[in-house]
Amino acid sequence: MSASPLGLIRAVQRCAAVPFARLDGSPGGQSAIAKQPVQGPVAVGTLGLQGDEQGNPRSHGGPEKAVHHYAYEHYAAWHAELGDLPVLREPAAFGENLSSTGVTEADICWGDQLRIGSVLLEVSQSRQPCWKLNARFGQPGMARRVQDSGRTGWYYRVLEPGSLQAGDAIVLVERPWPQWPLTRVLQLLYHRMLDVQQLRELTRLPLPERWKTFVEHRLSTGTVEDWGSRIQG
């Protein structure tokens, strides 16, 4: 596999979990979505960046969602659609740990192994947006909008801990599933939701347990799982 960089990390971000308010102002538990940039190298272990936290470990974080990556290229589209929102002027509007240029969901495939700094990462799943984006953007339908747009970002598991920092190259080490760019996965998840042939092909990938459950549900029942609690809260 070529060692030519796919792109570059423009910012690395993290934060501790703090109390979070829902869009209507009511308590929404804890969240670490408002991440801030870090200067210099950051240690990365199997549970993510040192000093980074998750407000709800049952839904966020863990080895399968250790690091969240979002393409900075998408910000221009969001500015065009939503206007000059203050949240889009700050780093990590979408709660991402890694902000980059050069790669989007069209350039990354399921299971890709990438070297960033001394860390070896593996693409473990695309992001399934949740209601906290509604509150962060002050837009009641923002989570659904992110989902429908395909500009979701993706998660990594950490195969080899190490450190990384802004300016590091994103180097593709291995691509076991070149026929499954994340754009194809996202189309199947949210647009061609009951395409039986493609769903069966998707089951051949190393899916997280939660994904296996909803894909098998679609195949066995011919219906799509309920997204209400995830995208509306």
Image (tube, helix red, strand yellow):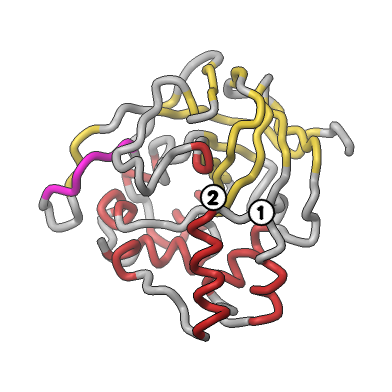
From mark 1 to mark 2, how far is it between C-alphas? 19 Å
- Range of magenta residues: 27-32
Q: How many marks?
A: 2
Q: Secondary structure at mark 2?
A: loop
Q: Which label number is shown at residue 153?
A: 2
**Residue 72, image x, y percentages:** 55, 43
Q: Is residue 75 left or right of residue 135?
A: right
- Callout 2: 10 Å neighbours few (<14), some, many (20+)? many
Q: Which residue is nearer to you in this view: 62 or 7? A: 62
Q: List the single residue furthest toward the top.
A: 40
Q: Which label number is shown at residue 64?
A: none
Q: Is residue 67 left or right of residue 85?
A: right
Q: Which residue is nearer to you in this view: 14 or 46? A: 46
* Quarter of the N terminus within the rendering: top right
Disc nearest the viewer among 1 and 2: 1
Quadrant of the rendered image containing residue 17? top left
On whether residue 54 falls in the magenta region, the answer is no
- Callout 1: 10 Å neighbours few (<14), some, many (20+)? few
Query: Pointer 1: what residue?
Result: 206
Q: List the single residue furthest toward the bottom.
A: 222
Residue drawn at x 80%, y 55% is: 178
| Mark 2: amino acid | Gly
Residue drawn at x 66%, y 53% is: 206
**Residue 216, image x, y percentages:** 55, 72
**Residue 202, image x, y percentages:** 67, 66
Residue drawn at x 32%, y 36% is: 32
| Mark 1: amino acid | Pro
